[in-house]
Amino acid sequence: MWLGRFYLRADRRIAHRVWYRRDGALIARAPVLLGVICWAGAVFLFLYGVRAFYAAWKGPGHLHVENGESQTVLSAVSTVLALSLLNPHVYLDTVVLLGGIGARYGWPGNAWFAAGAMCSSIVWFSALGFGARLLKLCSRRISRGECSM
């Protein structure tokens, strides 16, 4: 719940800066519009997540991993680099969001903030990778009918 409030506050700050700097006349005439837009965005994202969860839970399709063609190391590394470095969210999250938060602290504080962000990123993505392996085993058991949820 606190995460939702954090994102709502962050969205309001971002929307506040964008609307007041570019189209301040619109917000000046209807200040309630900013709140309506923020809440509409929050509701949209929530419903989008519910819809995606429902489709994953009840969907007819399954992901079948087959032992087909193998990739070369160069092909795999270039695909990973392309997916990582060409993703605009990488720059929005690391440069804009984390950079803006880290810039609030002085010299030793921003270095510690950067170190903490890097360590938490390593922990998070490692947990995603190992968690996916565990979910793969669980999904095999569910598809064979060994356990039900």
Image: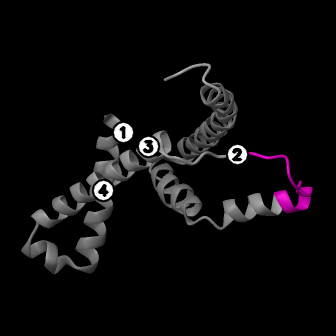
Disc 1 vs disc 2: which is toward the camera?
2
Q: Residues within 10 Å of mark 1 (few under 14, many from 20)?
A: few
- Residue labelled with disc 2: 64
What segment is highlighted magenta in the picture? 64-76
Callout 4: SS: helix
For the point 83% across and 57% down, the residue is: 76
- The kind of residue tagged 1 is Leu
Q: Label 1: which residue?
A: 3
Say whether disc 4 or disc 2 marks the residue closer to the N-terminus.
Answer: 4
Circle count:
4
Of mark 1 and mark 3, the one earlier in the sequence is 1
- Mark 4 is on which residue type? Phe
| Numbered mark located on residue 53 in the image | 3
Find residue 28 and name its label.
none
- Relative image position of residue 77 (x, y in whole percent): 83, 58
- Residue 131 sits in quarter: top right
Characterize the local packing of mark 4: few (<14), some (14-19) or many (20 or more) Cα atoms within 10 angstroms: few
Under mark 2, the amino acid is: His
